[in-house]
Each structure stands twice: as C-alpha cells, then as structure tokens.
Amino acid sequence: MAKAADIQSKRLSKQQLATNFGDLHPPLSDHEALVESDRCYFCHDAPCMTACPTTIDIPLFIREIQAGHPKSAAKTIFNQNILGGMCARVCPTETLCEEACVRQAAEGKPVKIGLLQRYATDQAMSEKHPFTRAKATGKKVAVVGAGPAGLACAHRLAMHGHTVTIFEARKKSGGLNEYGIAAYKAVDSFAAKEVEFVLSIGGIKVEHGQALGKKLKLAQLQKDFDAVFLGLGLAGVNDLGLKNDDLPGIEDAVDYIAELRQASDLSKLKVGRNVVVIGGGMTAIDIAVQSKLLGAENVTILYRRGAAHMKASPFEQDLAQTKGVLIKHWVAPKKVLVKAGKAVGLKCEYTTEKAKKLVGTGETFDIPADMIFKAIGQTYADAATGALKLEQGRIKVDAEKRTSITGIWAGGDCIAGGKDLTVASVDDGRRAAESIHSYLSA
Ligand SMILES: Cc1cc2nc3c(=O)[nH]c(=O)nc-3n(C[C@H](O)[C@H](O)[C@H](O)COP(=O)(O)OP(=O)(O)OC[C@H]3O[C@@H](n4cnc5c(N)ncnc54)[C@H](O)[C@@H]3O)c2cc1C
Ligand code: SF4
C-alpha cells in the first residue's frame, strides 16, 4: 500500500482559498443585532452570566444594544473581559453561555450571545480606549507571556496605575490568538488589532524575543519588579509513544497551525492529499478542517473513544463533518507504517471500553497518509526551572492565582486546573491582576 507522499502547495486557487478561509460566523448587521437583542428576556440571576467564565453581565450588555448603545455594551463586556472581541469569535458558546440560555432550554434556539458580543465590541475597538489609567502607583510588574492570560493581567494592572513590562518569547504578541486559533475564526489580523487595542491603555511595554528560562531568569525578575505574573501557556507537546513517531511525515498540529496562521500566502502552504489527524480536541478539529480547506482530498480524524468523550464540542465536530472530514471513533494508532525513512500511514486497532478501561479489540486496519498530524494535547514546559510547586504537571495556584512563591502569580493554560480556553485564561489574568493590586496596595 505504501507509495511516495503526495504533499503539495497550490491545491486550490487563491480565490478558492480566500473563500474557504473567510469568516466562520459573519458579523450581525445593525438590524439583525436589534432583532436578536429583542429575543433576550433579561433574566434575573441570568444563567448565561453564571456560565460565562468571565461573568460578563450579559443581560445588561444585550439591553444596551437593544437601547441603541452598542459602545456602552462594549464597555460592559470589556470591564470583565478586555479580550471580549476575540472571545466573541472563539468561545465555544454552545457549551457555555448559549447552552445555559433559557431560550435554549425552552425552544432549542438560544439568544446569539457570541454574535451580539462581537457586534458591540467591534464597534468600540476602533474608538478611543474605553478605560483610563489610575494615578501612577510607582509599582512595577513583570508579566511573562503575551497570550490572553498575560495581556488581560497586564491591562488590568495598567488600569490600576501600575507599570507593566511583558516579556514574550515570540516575535509577536497574542499567544495562541495569534499563532493557534483557527484562521477562519479570527480573520483580517484580528489578533494583532486586539493586542494594539489592549496596549492602547498605556503603561505597558512589551519586550519580544525574551524567553524565561533562557537568558531571562525568574530570580532576576523577582529582584527587578514588585510582582511577577506567569502566563506561559503550554509550550511542550505530548508524544504518540509509538516507534518511529518522529519520522518525516508526522507533524505536530500546533506547529503546522502556527505556520498557517503566519503565512502571507496560503497557496504556498503544502498539504497532503491524504491527511490523518490523531486526537479528539479543538486542535484536532482545527487542523483537520484547515487541511481540508487547503485542498486535502481525504482528511480523517482518529479518536480512541466515542463522540461524547471528545473534548471538541458537538458544534466543532459537526463543523468538521460538514467540511468533509471523516471522524473515526474507537480507534487507536498501533504502529507507524514506514517507507524509505518516511511515515506513510498508520496501523490502527479498534478500541472498546471494558470495566471502564480502554482496551484494543485485536482487530486492526491500515490507513495510508501523506501527512499525519499529532493533536494529542500539549504539556507545560517548566520555564521557571523547578522553582515553583507543580500539580498535575502544571503550576499550582490558589483561588487568587498565587503560586507557591510569594510575589509570583500565574494563570491561563500553564496552571493546574486550567480549562484550556481563551476566555478562562483571560479570567485568570484579570483575577491575578486584582490580587496583585491588593498585594501592592497593602
Ligand atoms: C490549535 C488550538 C486551537 C484553539 N482554539 C481555541 C478556540 O477556538 N477557542 C478557545 O476558547 N480556545 C482555543 N484554544 C485554547 C486557547 O488558545 C488557550 O487556552 C489560550 O490561548 C491560553 O492562553 P494563555 O495566555 O494561557 O497561553 P498562550 O496563548 O499559549 O500564550 C502564552 C504566551 O507565552 C509565551 N511564552 C511561553 N513560554 C515562554 C517563556 N518561557 N518566556 C516568555 N514567553 C513565553 C508564548 O510565546 C505565548 O505568547 C486553542 C488552542 C490551540 C492549541
Ligand atoms: S439566559 Fe438568554 S434570555 Fe436570559 S438573559 Fe441570558 S441571553 Fe437573555
């Protein structure tokens, strides 16, 4: 079965690619926003608000839209979530606020909270920054990582009058908003525009190319700053644990997505004719859908359990299937098929659950692949070189996001119990900033 890999660029025309990578959820018009806001019951003790990790006052901002004040609505959102624009685009609302909406329970059609949030925030982001800084406190805070957690933390600290320096390893700010989120969720360089918006409050300096754990040391930051926040994300990747899983032909999905997000011309990006993705989360769906949109002919996701176990929401799973991706459940890769030093497919085994344990059935099949993507989760790479206590392999924090060392806070994907969602990282960053502010004000 093994043959030379068919991996090519220009599988589709530039025009087709532009269509394929267009906005997944186009914005609401003024009229649509008014009609949609009219559907809200403005519930007391609104369940949508409780379901939002950043506890945005959803009924209030929808009422503000309904009353014709979208910019006030945006301020209500930004007050809790300064990255409300990105969250409106990437939040799995179908498992958060919209799942909790009473109209979902009553008629299976929730208020389109995500799109209303986008409507409001889009109108306000091109305007003057909605918040002003408090009087300068003279306190300095180091934030490591310019992802959603770091940016949210830096913004709230700047608002309280502290001076913030963000140290970021990569060339651009934004973290996975810039390098990871599926291209069709954040079109028109939205991630970069949002960073500019967040920083426009003033009092925040970003130093790129500064990786903690290399020249930059935690001990030095502790000396030079009054407090430190770590928003390091997950820089490590899980291994498949199979022989030959590092051969050409097998790629890490997150690296490929980063390349895709930074490509100025998608037609130059190479993609296989037959693509196989291993995993069951958002990254698996994203790499599968984007491979298909780049022109791959057959894209198959292999997941070792059933649909209900997948970390990707039912909406994401449906999206993949409507784009032509095949999801094979209850299968696990057993062996990498190799030809001339390259991975050309996988031998897989069907799986089942026995006494709550996942076991192979013994029945196998081969699947050919020009490209195999690993999307089996990321791990925390300890940039603080053992100084901080870890829990389940990530940084241990308390409810205020304080780490085991006084003066150091952490939030986002790098902390234990992190939900691996943009909105949860923003919430961590803001909460940590409030805790840092209390510490610095004491
Ligand atoms: C492919 C993919 C798709 C996703 N899609 C969605 C989605 O649709 N919706 C959603 O809600 N969530 C999604 N997520 C999850 C979401 O992106 C993350 O939960 C979120 O970005 C975490 O924010 P963070 O700030 O903790 O980390 P990150 O966004 O990872 O940012 C961490 C930052 O720290 C920097 N950094 C790391 N180590 C160092 C160091 N040693 N020194 C200095 N800087 C450092 C990194 O370069 C990065 O800029 C997705 C994740 C992936 C991988
Ligand atoms: S639950 Fe639904 S109807 Fe009630 S306030 Fe929230 S969005 Fe409006």
Image (cartoon, rainbow, N blue to C red):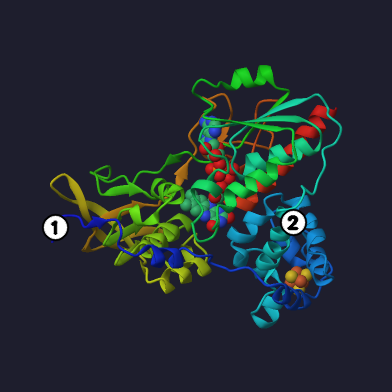
Please tell me in which quadrant of the rendered image residue 47 appears: bottom right
Question: Would you call the spot at circle 1 few (<14 residues within 10 Å), some (14-19), or many (20 or more)?
Answer: few
Q: At label 1, which amino acid type do we have?
A: Lys
Residue, far bottom: 107
Q: Is the C-beta separation of discs 2 and 1 under 8 Å?
A: no
Residue located 24% across and 45% down the image: 248
Camera-nearest residue between 433 and 390? 433
Left or right, 211 with respect to 137, comes to left
Residue 10 shown left or right of residue 180 in the figure = left
Above or below, comparing residue 36 to residue 373 in the picture:
below
Residue 76 occupies which quadrant of the picture? Answer: bottom right
Q: Is residue 40 visible?
A: yes
Q: What label does residue 124 carry, if any?
A: 2
The answer for how far apart the CA atoms under marks 2 and 1 are is 54 Å
Front disc: 2 or 1: 2
Quadrant location, the C terminus: top right
- Residue 3 disc label: 1
* Rendered position, 167 above or below 29: above
Residue at 79% over, 29% down: 439
Amino acid type assigned to the residue bearing label 2 in the image: Ala
* Residue 171 position within the rendered picture, expressed as x and y whole percent measured from the top left: 51, 36
